[in-house]
């Protein structure tokens, strides 16, 4: 079995919350995979469970403090590197969604829109999105005035109105336009 890991991140464009990456190596093929953004919430959750049952997987994150300190691109790469290093098996090749790749001594290839047509990357996209969405729903309970469960930290009108009315929370990215003007 050739151990190929797909890697993707979610939350890069958000105003709040960490950036989350996932790495996935299949044990078995999984039908119905596609970019997580093109799936319903229900289908994403179903596939996430199926992926975790049929693969080696791990998550990596970069905190809001890390994002504000090193910038979102470097934080995304750090989250990806952590996800890869957290795998219980070492891949021989890594396929990363996008144009930037984490600094690792493993054969790594970047693929633009890889989450749309590389199953391992689609799987990573799906489990990372479900993981981060669940985290944002926990933040919603802690900060109910910000409606994190509805927008997941993205810069919607509702989210920006809450920032204008209530200020920011500790989970907001202070270096992002729209958080601090």
Image (cartoon, rainbow, N blue to C red):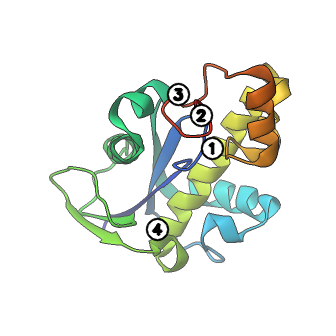
Q: Residue 85 appears in which quarter of the rendering? A: top left
In this picture, is 83 found above or below 56?
above
Alpha carbon distance from label 4 to label 1: 17 Å
Indicate the quadrant containing the C terminus: top left, top right, bottom left or bottom right.
Answer: top right
Are discs 4 and 1 less than 8 Å apart at CB? no
The residue closer to the viewer here, 167 or 173, is 167
Q: Residue 136 appears in which quarter of the rendering? A: top right
SS under mark 1: helix
Q: Is residue 143 left or right of residue 125?
A: right
The residue closer to the viewer here, 34 or 145, is 145
Looking at marks 1 and 3 on the same chain, the residue that comes earlier in the sequence is marked by: 1
SS under mark 4: helix
Q: Mark 1 points at which residue?
A: 131
Q: In this view, does 59 lie to the left or right of 109?
A: right
Q: Mark 4 points at which residue?
A: 120
Q: Where is residue 124 in the image (x, y as percent from the top left)?
A: 51, 58
Indicate the quadrant containing the N terminus: top left, top right, bottom left or bottom right.
Answer: bottom left
């Amino acid at each position: 079995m050739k151990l190929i890991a797909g890697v993707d991140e979610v939350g890069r464009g958000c105003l709040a919350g960490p950036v989350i990456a996932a790495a996935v190596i299949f044990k078995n093929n999984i039908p119905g995979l596609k970019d997580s953004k093109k799936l319903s919430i229900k289908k994403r959750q179903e596939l996430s469970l199926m992926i975790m049952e049929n693969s080696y997987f791990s998550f990596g994150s970069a905190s809001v403090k890390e994002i504000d300190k090193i910038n979102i691109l470097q934080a995304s790469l750090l989250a990806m590197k952590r996800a890869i290093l957290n795998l219980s098996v070492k891949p021989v090749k890594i396929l990363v969604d996008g144009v930037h790749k984490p600094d690792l001594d493993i054969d790594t290839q970047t693929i633009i829109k890889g989450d749309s047509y590389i199953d391992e990357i689609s799987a990573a996209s799906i489990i990372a999105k479900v993981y981060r969405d669940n985290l944002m729903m926990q933040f919603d309970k802690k900060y109910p005035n910000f409606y994190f469960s509805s927008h997941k930290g993205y810069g919607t009108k509702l989210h920006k109105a809450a920032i204008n009315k209530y200020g920011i929370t500790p989970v907001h990215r202070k270096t992002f336009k729209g958080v601090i003007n």
